[in-house]
Image: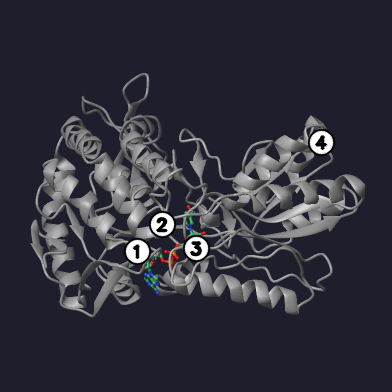
Protein backbone atom coordinates (compact mmCIF):
# COMPACT_ATOMS: atom_id res chain seq x y z
CA UNK A 1 0.00 0.00 0.00
CA UNK A 2 1.37 3.41 -0.95
CA UNK A 3 0.81 5.37 2.20
CA UNK A 4 3.90 7.58 2.61
CA UNK A 5 5.07 10.36 0.34
CA UNK A 6 8.86 10.63 0.26
CA UNK A 7 10.72 12.67 -2.34
CA UNK A 8 7.59 12.90 -4.45
CA UNK A 9 7.02 9.11 -4.54
CA UNK A 10 4.27 7.20 -2.78
CA UNK A 11 5.70 4.15 -1.03
CA UNK A 12 5.07 1.54 1.67
CA UNK A 13 6.17 1.97 5.26
CA UNK A 14 8.98 -0.20 6.60
CA UNK A 15 8.17 0.14 10.31
CA UNK A 16 5.49 -1.37 12.58
CA UNK A 17 2.06 -2.17 11.20
CA UNK A 18 -0.89 -0.15 12.46
CA UNK A 19 -4.49 0.55 11.51
CA UNK A 20 -7.09 3.25 11.84
CA UNK A 21 -10.54 2.27 13.08
CA UNK A 22 -13.93 3.90 12.84
CA UNK A 23 -14.61 4.66 16.54
CA UNK A 24 -18.34 4.05 16.12
CA UNK A 25 -18.20 0.50 14.72
CA UNK A 26 -14.49 -0.49 14.85
CA UNK A 27 -14.42 -0.99 11.07
CA UNK A 28 -10.86 -0.85 9.67
CA UNK A 29 -10.50 2.31 7.58
CA UNK A 30 -6.79 2.29 6.89
CA UNK A 31 -4.10 -0.33 7.24
CA UNK A 32 -0.40 0.25 6.76
CA UNK A 33 3.03 0.37 8.27
CA UNK A 34 4.75 3.28 9.91
CA UNK A 35 7.79 5.03 8.47
CA UNK A 36 11.06 3.55 9.72
CA UNK A 37 13.90 5.71 11.02
CA UNK A 38 15.72 5.10 7.71
CA UNK A 39 12.68 6.37 5.78
CA UNK A 40 12.53 9.43 8.03
CA UNK A 41 16.18 10.17 7.19
CA UNK A 42 15.51 9.66 3.50
CA UNK A 43 12.63 12.15 3.64
CA UNK A 44 14.81 14.65 5.51
CA UNK A 45 17.52 14.37 2.81
CA UNK A 46 14.92 14.91 0.07
CA UNK A 47 13.48 17.90 1.96
CA UNK A 48 16.97 19.38 2.33
CA UNK A 49 17.68 18.92 -1.37
CA UNK A 50 14.36 20.55 -2.31
CA UNK A 51 14.66 23.44 0.12
CA UNK A 52 16.78 25.96 -1.82
CA UNK A 53 14.68 25.72 -4.98
CA UNK A 54 11.44 26.23 -3.05
CA UNK A 55 12.73 28.97 -0.77
CA UNK A 56 14.20 30.97 -3.66
CA UNK A 57 11.00 30.90 -5.67
CA UNK A 58 9.29 34.28 -5.61
CA UNK A 59 6.61 34.43 -2.93
CA UNK A 60 3.92 35.00 -5.57
CA UNK A 61 4.74 31.59 -7.08
CA UNK A 62 4.50 29.87 -3.71
CA UNK A 63 1.17 31.59 -3.17
CA UNK A 64 -0.10 30.20 -6.49
CA UNK A 65 0.68 26.63 -5.36
CA UNK A 66 -0.94 27.15 -1.97
CA UNK A 67 -4.05 28.62 -3.61
CA UNK A 68 -4.26 25.61 -5.93
CA UNK A 69 -4.20 23.45 -2.82
CA UNK A 70 -7.23 25.38 -1.53
CA UNK A 71 -9.00 24.77 -4.86
CA UNK A 72 -8.32 21.04 -4.57
CA UNK A 73 -9.69 21.07 -1.02
CA UNK A 74 -12.86 22.73 -2.34
CA UNK A 75 -13.22 19.96 -4.93
CA UNK A 76 -12.56 17.27 -2.31
CA UNK A 77 -14.56 18.93 0.48
CA UNK A 78 -17.23 16.24 0.86
CA UNK A 79 -14.73 13.38 0.56
CA UNK A 80 -12.56 14.95 3.22
CA UNK A 81 -15.46 15.79 5.56
CA UNK A 82 -16.70 12.20 5.33
CA UNK A 83 -13.19 10.87 5.98
CA UNK A 84 -12.93 13.09 9.10
CA UNK A 85 -16.32 11.87 10.30
CA UNK A 86 -15.45 8.23 9.74
CA UNK A 87 -11.99 8.40 11.23
CA UNK A 88 -12.68 10.41 14.40
CA UNK A 89 -16.44 10.27 14.78
CA UNK A 90 -17.02 14.03 14.39
CA UNK A 91 -20.55 14.78 13.11
CA UNK A 92 -20.69 15.65 9.43
CA UNK A 93 -21.88 19.23 10.06
CA UNK A 94 -18.79 19.81 12.19
CA UNK A 95 -16.41 17.95 9.89
CA UNK A 96 -17.59 20.26 7.10
CA UNK A 97 -16.71 23.31 9.19
CA UNK A 98 -13.25 21.81 9.70
CA UNK A 99 -12.74 21.52 5.93
CA UNK A 100 -13.96 25.10 5.48
CA UNK A 101 -11.41 26.24 8.06
CA UNK A 102 -8.68 24.44 6.09
CA UNK A 103 -9.69 26.21 2.89
CA UNK A 104 -9.94 29.61 4.58
CA UNK A 105 -6.54 29.11 6.22
CA UNK A 106 -4.86 29.72 2.86
CA UNK A 107 -6.08 33.30 2.36
CA UNK A 108 -5.63 34.03 6.08
CA UNK A 109 -2.04 32.78 6.00
CA UNK A 110 -1.20 34.87 2.94
CA UNK A 111 -2.50 37.97 4.75
CA UNK A 112 -0.89 37.20 8.10
CA UNK A 113 2.45 36.45 6.49
CA UNK A 114 2.38 39.81 4.71
CA UNK A 115 1.56 41.55 7.99
CA UNK A 116 3.87 39.64 10.33
CA UNK A 117 6.73 38.44 8.13
CA UNK A 118 6.80 40.62 5.03
CA UNK A 119 9.54 42.94 3.74
CA UNK A 120 9.95 46.40 5.20
CA UNK A 121 12.25 49.15 4.05
CA UNK A 122 13.23 52.22 6.06
CA UNK A 123 12.08 55.55 4.59
CA UNK A 124 15.57 56.50 3.38
CA UNK A 125 16.29 53.00 2.04
CA UNK A 126 19.19 52.42 4.45
CA UNK A 127 17.44 49.74 6.51
CA UNK A 128 15.58 46.66 5.50
CA UNK A 129 13.75 43.93 7.40
CA UNK A 130 13.09 40.65 5.66
CA UNK A 131 12.24 37.10 6.72
CA UNK A 132 13.84 33.84 5.71
CA UNK A 133 12.58 30.27 6.13
CA UNK A 134 14.31 28.00 8.63
CA UNK A 135 14.90 25.14 6.20
CA UNK A 136 13.50 21.69 6.91
CA UNK A 137 10.72 21.60 9.49
CA UNK A 138 8.59 18.80 10.90
CA UNK A 139 4.87 19.11 11.68
CA UNK A 140 3.35 16.69 14.21
CA UNK A 141 -0.43 16.71 14.29
CA UNK A 142 -3.06 15.66 16.83
CA UNK A 143 -6.14 13.58 16.06
CA UNK A 144 -8.91 15.94 17.15
CA UNK A 145 -8.69 18.29 14.14
CA UNK A 146 -6.77 15.97 11.81
CA UNK A 147 -7.12 18.34 8.85
CA UNK A 148 -7.27 21.85 10.26
CA UNK A 149 -4.54 21.77 12.91
CA UNK A 150 -1.64 20.30 10.91
CA UNK A 151 -2.80 22.58 8.08
CA UNK A 152 -2.39 25.56 10.42
CA UNK A 153 1.35 24.83 10.53
CA UNK A 154 1.88 23.42 7.03
CA UNK A 155 0.33 26.28 5.01
CA UNK A 156 2.34 29.11 6.65
CA UNK A 157 5.50 26.96 6.72
CA UNK A 158 5.31 26.32 2.97
CA UNK A 159 4.39 29.92 2.22
CA UNK A 160 7.48 31.04 4.11
CA UNK A 161 9.59 28.74 1.92
CA UNK A 162 10.32 25.82 4.25
CA UNK A 163 10.35 22.16 3.29
CA UNK A 164 7.93 20.23 5.49
CA UNK A 165 7.88 16.71 6.91
CA UNK A 166 4.35 15.95 8.04
CA UNK A 167 3.64 13.22 10.56
CA UNK A 168 -0.08 13.09 11.33
CA UNK A 169 -1.58 11.34 14.33
CA UNK A 170 -1.44 7.56 13.97
CA UNK A 171 -5.20 7.69 14.65
CA UNK A 172 -5.92 9.72 11.50
CA UNK A 173 -3.70 8.48 8.65
CA UNK A 174 -6.51 8.49 6.11
CA UNK A 175 -7.44 12.17 6.46
CA UNK A 176 -3.73 13.01 6.20
CA UNK A 177 -3.33 11.00 3.02
CA UNK A 178 -6.26 12.73 1.30
CA UNK A 179 -4.87 16.12 2.32
CA UNK A 180 -1.36 15.39 1.07
CA UNK A 181 -2.70 14.11 -2.26
CA UNK A 182 -4.27 17.58 -2.64
CA UNK A 183 -0.88 19.18 -2.05
CA UNK A 184 0.63 16.97 -4.72
CA UNK A 185 -2.16 17.88 -7.12
CA UNK A 186 -1.47 21.55 -6.42
CA UNK A 187 1.96 21.13 -7.98
CA UNK A 188 4.25 21.18 -4.96
CA UNK A 189 7.75 20.15 -6.13
CA UNK A 190 9.06 16.72 -5.04
CA UNK A 191 10.57 16.66 -1.56
CA UNK A 192 9.04 19.96 -0.43
CA UNK A 193 6.32 18.11 1.48
CA UNK A 194 6.72 14.55 2.73
CA UNK A 195 4.09 12.45 4.49
CA UNK A 196 5.44 10.09 7.14
CA UNK A 197 2.80 7.96 8.80
CA UNK A 198 3.31 6.45 12.22
CA UNK A 199 3.03 6.95 15.96
CA UNK A 200 5.37 7.81 18.79
CA UNK A 201 8.42 6.06 17.36
CA UNK A 202 8.16 7.81 14.00
CA UNK A 203 7.66 11.11 15.84
CA UNK A 204 10.74 10.50 17.95
CA UNK A 205 12.79 9.61 14.87
CA UNK A 206 11.68 12.85 13.21
CA UNK A 207 12.52 14.92 16.27
CA UNK A 208 15.98 13.29 16.37
CA UNK A 209 16.65 13.90 12.65
CA UNK A 210 18.65 16.76 11.12
CA UNK A 211 15.76 19.21 11.05
CA UNK A 212 15.70 22.96 11.68
CA UNK A 213 12.37 23.17 13.46
CA UNK A 214 9.40 21.21 14.72
CA UNK A 215 5.86 22.54 15.00
CA UNK A 216 3.77 20.44 17.35
CA UNK A 217 0.10 20.36 18.33
CA UNK A 218 -0.84 17.71 20.87
CA UNK A 219 -0.81 16.80 24.51
CA UNK A 220 1.34 18.42 27.17
CA UNK A 221 3.03 15.11 27.98
CA UNK A 222 4.23 14.68 24.39
CA UNK A 223 5.20 18.34 24.12
CA UNK A 224 7.32 18.02 27.27
CA UNK A 225 8.98 14.87 25.87
CA UNK A 226 9.84 16.75 22.68
CA UNK A 227 11.19 19.64 24.71
CA UNK A 228 13.50 17.22 26.53
CA UNK A 229 14.56 15.72 23.21
CA UNK A 230 15.41 19.21 21.92
CA UNK A 231 17.46 20.08 25.01
CA UNK A 232 20.93 21.27 24.02
CA UNK A 233 19.75 22.26 20.53
CA UNK A 234 19.07 25.98 20.71
CA UNK A 235 19.54 26.12 16.94
CA UNK A 236 16.35 24.09 16.39
CA UNK A 237 13.06 25.87 16.73
CA UNK A 238 10.35 24.13 18.71
CA UNK A 239 6.79 25.48 18.66
CA UNK A 240 4.47 23.70 21.10
CA UNK A 241 0.67 23.97 21.17
CA UNK A 242 -0.60 21.76 23.97
CA UNK A 243 -3.56 20.94 26.16
CA UNK A 244 -5.36 22.78 28.95
CA UNK A 245 -7.45 22.42 32.08
CA UNK A 246 -9.61 25.36 31.18
CA UNK A 247 -11.83 27.18 33.68
CA UNK A 248 -15.17 28.77 32.83
CA UNK A 249 -16.36 31.09 35.56
CA UNK A 250 -20.05 31.87 35.69
CA UNK A 251 -21.54 34.71 37.71
CA UNK A 252 -25.23 35.18 38.48
CA UNK A 253 -26.41 36.68 35.16
CA UNK A 254 -29.82 37.79 34.04
CA UNK A 255 -30.00 35.49 31.01
CA UNK A 256 -29.41 32.13 32.63
CA UNK A 257 -30.67 30.22 29.58
CA UNK A 258 -27.95 31.82 27.44
CA UNK A 259 -25.36 30.96 30.11
CA UNK A 260 -26.45 27.31 29.93
CA UNK A 261 -26.06 27.30 26.13
CA UNK A 262 -22.57 28.80 26.37
CA UNK A 263 -21.56 26.20 28.96
CA UNK A 264 -22.87 23.31 26.83
CA UNK A 265 -20.98 24.49 23.77
CA UNK A 266 -17.85 25.17 25.82
CA UNK A 267 -17.77 21.77 27.50
CA UNK A 268 -19.31 19.28 25.11
CA UNK A 269 -18.80 20.37 21.51
CA UNK A 270 -16.63 17.86 19.61
CA UNK A 271 -17.47 15.46 22.46
CA UNK A 272 -15.19 17.59 24.65
CA UNK A 273 -12.22 16.95 22.36
CA UNK A 274 -11.16 20.52 21.72
CA UNK A 275 -8.10 21.85 23.49
CA UNK A 276 -10.10 24.91 24.53
CA UNK A 277 -13.07 23.02 25.96
CA UNK A 278 -14.15 24.08 29.44
CA UNK A 279 -12.99 21.40 31.87
CA UNK A 280 -13.89 23.21 35.08
CA UNK A 281 -17.07 25.18 35.62
CA UNK A 282 -16.87 27.61 38.52
CA UNK A 283 -20.35 28.21 39.94
CA UNK A 284 -21.33 30.47 42.87
CA UNK A 285 -22.64 28.83 46.03
CA UNK A 286 -26.29 29.60 46.73
CA UNK A 287 -29.69 29.45 45.10
CA UNK A 288 -28.76 31.00 41.71
CA UNK A 289 -25.90 28.54 41.28
CA UNK A 290 -28.13 25.60 42.30
CA UNK A 291 -30.69 26.63 39.69
CA UNK A 292 -28.03 27.03 37.00
CA UNK A 293 -26.75 23.51 37.67
CA UNK A 294 -30.26 22.07 37.63
CA UNK A 295 -30.93 23.65 34.22
CA UNK A 296 -27.49 22.67 32.94
CA UNK A 297 -27.93 19.02 33.89
CA UNK A 298 -31.35 18.98 32.28
CA UNK A 299 -30.05 20.53 29.05
CA UNK A 300 -26.94 18.31 28.94
CA UNK A 301 -28.99 15.17 29.34
CA UNK A 302 -31.02 16.24 26.29
CA UNK A 303 -27.91 16.53 24.05
CA UNK A 304 -27.90 13.91 21.36
CA UNK A 305 -24.66 11.99 20.75
CA UNK A 306 -24.59 9.77 17.67
CA UNK A 307 -22.73 8.37 14.67
CA UNK A 308 -21.10 11.00 12.46
CA UNK A 309 -23.65 10.50 9.68
CA UNK A 310 -26.80 10.00 11.76
CA UNK A 311 -29.98 11.78 10.63
CA UNK A 312 -31.08 14.07 12.19
CA UNK A 313 -27.54 15.16 12.85
CA UNK A 314 -26.24 14.61 16.36
CA UNK A 315 -24.79 17.41 18.50
CA UNK A 316 -21.68 15.36 19.23
CA UNK A 317 -20.10 12.19 17.95
CA UNK A 318 -17.89 9.56 19.50
CA UNK A 319 -14.61 10.12 21.26
CA UNK A 320 -11.60 8.92 19.30
CA UNK A 321 -11.46 5.29 20.44
CA UNK A 322 -12.78 2.68 22.84
CA UNK A 323 -9.51 3.14 24.74
CA UNK A 324 -10.20 6.87 25.18
CA UNK A 325 -13.80 6.10 26.21
CA UNK A 326 -12.52 3.73 28.91
CA UNK A 327 -9.97 6.27 30.14
CA UNK A 328 -12.73 8.86 30.54
CA UNK A 329 -14.94 6.46 32.49
CA UNK A 330 -11.95 5.65 34.68
CA UNK A 331 -11.25 9.36 35.22
CA UNK A 332 -14.84 9.85 36.36
CA UNK A 333 -14.57 6.86 38.70
CA UNK A 334 -11.32 8.23 40.12
CA UNK A 335 -12.93 11.61 40.83
CA UNK A 336 -15.84 9.84 42.55
CA UNK A 337 -13.42 7.89 44.73
CA UNK A 338 -11.75 11.18 45.69
CA UNK A 339 -15.11 12.53 46.84
CA UNK A 340 -16.68 13.89 43.64
CA UNK A 341 -20.45 13.84 43.29
CA UNK A 342 -21.79 12.97 39.81
CA UNK A 343 -24.56 15.37 38.79
CA UNK A 344 -24.91 13.67 35.41
CA UNK A 345 -22.96 10.44 34.98
CA UNK A 346 -20.85 10.02 31.85
CA UNK A 347 -21.79 6.65 30.38
CA UNK A 348 -20.90 4.59 27.36
CA UNK A 349 -24.07 4.50 25.30
CA UNK A 350 -23.45 1.49 23.13
CA UNK A 351 -21.32 -1.62 23.39
CA UNK A 352 -18.44 -1.53 20.91
CA UNK A 353 -18.92 2.18 20.12
CA UNK A 354 -16.81 4.95 21.67
CA UNK A 355 -20.02 6.90 22.17
CA UNK A 356 -20.28 8.68 25.52
CA UNK A 357 -23.03 10.72 27.07
CA UNK A 358 -21.96 14.08 28.58
CA UNK A 359 -20.88 13.87 32.20
CA UNK A 360 -20.96 16.55 34.91
CA UNK A 361 -19.35 15.97 38.28
CA UNK A 362 -19.17 18.25 41.33
CA UNK A 363 -15.62 18.15 42.74
CA UNK A 364 -16.02 20.99 45.27
CA UNK A 365 -15.58 18.61 48.20
CA UNK A 366 -12.23 17.31 46.99
CA UNK A 367 -9.26 18.27 49.13
CA UNK A 368 -7.18 18.57 46.00
CA UNK A 369 -8.60 18.39 42.49
CA UNK A 370 -6.21 16.62 40.04
CA UNK A 371 -4.83 19.20 37.62
CA UNK A 372 -5.28 16.99 34.57
CA UNK A 373 -6.80 17.43 31.15
CA UNK A 374 -9.61 14.88 30.74
CA UNK A 375 -9.98 15.07 26.97
CA UNK A 376 -13.65 14.26 26.51
CA UNK A 377 -17.19 15.19 27.57
CA UNK A 378 -16.56 15.31 31.32
CA UNK A 379 -17.15 18.67 33.03
CA UNK A 380 -16.06 19.26 36.62
CA UNK A 381 -17.97 21.74 38.77
CA UNK A 382 -16.36 23.76 41.55
CA UNK A 383 -18.55 25.98 43.71
CA UNK A 384 -17.05 29.29 44.86
CA UNK A 385 -17.72 31.97 47.44
CA UNK A 386 -17.01 35.42 45.98
CA UNK A 387 -15.33 36.58 42.78
CA UNK A 388 -11.78 36.71 44.16
CA UNK A 389 -11.93 33.07 45.27
CA UNK A 390 -13.29 32.16 41.84
CA UNK A 391 -10.33 33.83 40.11
CA UNK A 392 -7.95 31.94 42.39
CA UNK A 393 -9.65 28.66 41.49
CA UNK A 394 -9.53 29.56 37.79
CA UNK A 395 -5.78 30.13 37.94
CA UNK A 396 -5.07 27.07 40.10
CA UNK A 397 -3.67 25.08 37.20
CA UNK A 398 -0.28 24.39 35.65
CA UNK A 399 -1.89 24.90 32.23
CA UNK A 400 -2.78 28.24 30.71
CA UNK A 401 -4.65 27.78 27.46
CA UNK A 402 -8.16 29.23 27.79
CA UNK A 403 -10.27 30.87 30.49
CA UNK A 404 -13.77 32.25 30.20
CA UNK A 405 -16.15 34.46 32.13
CA UNK A 406 -19.93 34.62 31.90
CA UNK A 407 -20.93 37.87 33.58
CA UNK A 408 -23.11 40.96 33.10
CA UNK A 409 -20.38 43.20 34.52
CA UNK A 410 -17.68 44.78 32.36
CA UNK A 411 -15.73 45.71 35.53
CA UNK A 412 -15.64 42.05 36.51
CA UNK A 413 -14.43 41.10 33.06
CA UNK A 414 -11.72 43.75 33.18
CA UNK A 415 -10.45 42.20 36.42
CA UNK A 416 -10.77 38.64 35.10
CA UNK A 417 -8.93 39.62 31.92
CA UNK A 418 -6.14 41.26 33.88
CA UNK A 419 -5.64 38.37 36.32
CA UNK A 420 -6.26 35.29 34.16
CA UNK A 421 -3.14 33.34 33.24
CA UNK A 422 -4.19 32.05 29.84
CA UNK A 423 -3.61 32.81 26.16
CA UNK A 424 -7.33 32.94 25.36
CA UNK A 425 -9.62 34.88 27.69
CA UNK A 426 -13.25 35.07 26.54
CA UNK A 427 -16.26 36.94 27.89
CA UNK A 428 -19.85 35.75 27.37
CA UNK A 429 -18.71 33.60 24.45
CA UNK A 430 -18.12 29.86 24.23
CA UNK A 431 -14.59 29.04 25.37
CA UNK A 432 -14.16 26.97 22.24
CA UNK A 433 -14.65 29.97 19.96
CA UNK A 434 -11.51 31.55 18.50
CA UNK A 435 -11.00 34.18 15.83
CA UNK A 436 -8.94 33.19 12.80
CA UNK A 437 -7.56 36.72 12.76
CA UNK A 438 -6.02 36.34 16.24
CA UNK A 439 -3.06 34.41 17.64
CA UNK A 440 -3.87 31.11 19.32
CA UNK A 441 -1.81 29.52 22.08
CA UNK A 442 -1.29 29.19 25.78
CA UNK A 443 1.24 29.57 28.54
CA UNK A 444 2.38 27.28 31.35
CA UNK A 445 2.05 23.62 30.41
CA UNK A 446 -0.08 24.67 27.41
CA UNK A 447 2.62 26.15 25.20
CA UNK A 448 6.10 27.60 24.88
CA UNK A 449 5.18 31.14 23.89
CA UNK A 450 5.01 30.50 20.18
CA UNK A 451 1.33 31.07 19.48
CA UNK A 452 -0.13 29.78 16.25
CA UNK A 453 -2.98 30.91 13.94
CA UNK A 454 -2.44 34.59 13.03
CA UNK A 455 1.05 34.49 14.57
CA UNK A 456 2.11 31.21 12.87
CA UNK A 457 4.10 33.28 10.36
CA UNK A 458 6.36 34.33 13.26
CA UNK A 459 7.73 30.85 13.94
CA UNK A 460 7.83 29.81 10.28
CA UNK A 461 10.61 32.28 9.43
CA UNK A 462 13.39 34.19 11.12
CA UNK A 463 13.94 37.95 10.71
CA UNK A 464 16.95 39.32 8.84
CA UNK A 465 17.89 42.90 9.67
CA UNK A 466 19.94 44.78 7.08
CA UNK A 467 21.78 48.11 6.96
CA UNK A 468 22.50 48.97 3.35
CA UNK A 469 23.73 51.62 0.91
CA UNK A 470 23.73 51.38 -2.87
CA UNK A 471 26.73 53.72 -3.11
CA UNK A 472 29.86 52.76 -1.28
CA UNK A 473 31.28 55.44 1.02
CA UNK A 474 33.52 55.35 4.09
CA UNK A 475 31.64 55.05 7.38
CA UNK A 476 31.82 58.00 9.83
CA UNK A 477 35.25 58.26 11.44
CA UNK A 478 35.72 56.83 14.91
CA UNK A 479 38.44 57.90 17.36
CA UNK A 480 41.80 56.16 16.91
CA UNK A 481 41.10 54.95 13.35
CA UNK A 482 43.12 56.76 10.64
CA UNK A 483 40.80 58.39 8.08
P1 LIG B 1 -0.60 13.37 21.38
O1 LIG B 1 0.35 14.19 22.15
O2 LIG B 1 -0.91 12.01 21.87
O3 LIG B 1 -0.10 13.18 19.87
C1 LIG B 1 0.24 14.30 19.05
C2 LIG B 1 1.25 13.86 18.00
O4 LIG B 1 2.49 13.54 18.64
C3 LIG B 1 0.83 12.60 17.26
O5 LIG B 1 1.22 12.77 15.91
C4 LIG B 1 1.63 11.51 17.93
O6 LIG B 1 1.88 10.39 17.12
C5 LIG B 1 2.92 12.23 18.26
N1 LIG B 1 3.69 11.68 19.39
C6 LIG B 1 3.22 11.04 20.48
N2 LIG B 1 4.25 10.78 21.34
C7 LIG B 1 5.37 11.26 20.75
C8 LIG B 1 6.75 11.33 21.14
N3 LIG B 1 7.17 10.84 22.30
N4 LIG B 1 7.63 11.94 20.30
C9 LIG B 1 7.21 12.48 19.14
N5 LIG B 1 5.92 12.45 18.71
C10 LIG B 1 5.02 11.85 19.51
O7 LIG B 1 -1.93 14.25 21.24
P2 LIG B 1 -3.36 13.77 20.72
O8 LIG B 1 -3.94 12.84 21.74
O9 LIG B 1 -3.27 13.35 19.31
O10 LIG B 1 -4.18 15.14 20.73
C11 LIG B 1 -4.94 15.60 21.81
C12 LIG B 1 -4.14 16.59 22.62
O11 LIG B 1 -3.77 17.69 21.80
C13 LIG B 1 -4.90 17.19 23.78
O12 LIG B 1 -4.04 17.30 24.88
C14 LIG B 1 -5.28 18.56 23.27
O13 LIG B 1 -5.53 19.51 24.29
C15 LIG B 1 -4.10 18.92 22.46
N6 LIG B 1 -4.41 19.93 21.47
C16 LIG B 1 -3.86 21.18 21.61
C17 LIG B 1 -4.20 22.17 20.70
C18 LIG B 1 -3.63 23.56 20.79
O14 LIG B 1 -3.66 24.25 19.79
N7 LIG B 1 -3.14 24.00 21.91
C19 LIG B 1 -5.10 21.90 19.68
C20 LIG B 1 -5.62 20.62 19.58
C21 LIG B 1 -5.27 19.64 20.47
**Quadrant of ligand 1 in image:** bottom left
Please say if 34 is above or below 76. below
Instruction: Name the residue located 59 percent from the left edge and 65 percent from the top edge.
Output: 373
Disc 2 residue lies near ligand 1 with CB under 8 A? no
Q: Dots 3 and 4: beta carbons under 8 Å?
A: no
Numbered disc 1: secondary structure:
loop
Numbered disc 3: secondary structure:
loop
Instruction: Tell me how far mark 3 sits from mark 2, CA to CA.
Output: 9 Å
Q: Nearer the viewer, residue 482 or 278?
A: 278
Please say if 299 is above or below 57. below
For the C terminus, the quadrant is: top left
Q: Quadrant of residue 398?
A: bottom right
**Percent of width and height locating residue 286:** 92, 50
Q: Dots 3 and 2: beta carbons under 8 Å?
A: yes
Instruction: Tell me how far mark 3 sits from mark 4, CA to CA.
Output: 33 Å
Instruction: Tell me how far mark 4 sits from mark 2, CA to CA.
Output: 35 Å
Q: Nearer the viewer, residue 32 or 137?
A: 32
Q: Dots 2 and 1: beta carbons under 8 Å?
A: yes
Q: Which color mode does the image show?
A: one colour
Q: Quadrant of residue 405?
A: top right
Quickly name the residue at label 4.
253
Quickly name the residue at label 2.
89
Quickly name the residue at label 1.
22
Q: Is label 1 or label 4 in front? A: 1
Quickly name the residue at label 3.
355
Amino acid sequence: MNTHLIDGQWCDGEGDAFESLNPFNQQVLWLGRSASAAQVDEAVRAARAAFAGWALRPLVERIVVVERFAECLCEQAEVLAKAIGEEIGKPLWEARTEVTSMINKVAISVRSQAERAGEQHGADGSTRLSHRPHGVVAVLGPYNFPGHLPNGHIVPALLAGNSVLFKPSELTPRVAEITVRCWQQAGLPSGVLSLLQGGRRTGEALAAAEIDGLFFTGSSATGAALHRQFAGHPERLLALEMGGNNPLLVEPVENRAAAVQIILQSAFISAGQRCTCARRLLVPHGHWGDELLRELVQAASALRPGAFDDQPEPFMGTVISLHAARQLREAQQYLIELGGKPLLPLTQLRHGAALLSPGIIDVTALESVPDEEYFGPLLQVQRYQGFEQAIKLANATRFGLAAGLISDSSERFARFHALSRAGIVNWNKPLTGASSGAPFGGIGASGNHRPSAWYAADYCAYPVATLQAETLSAPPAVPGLPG
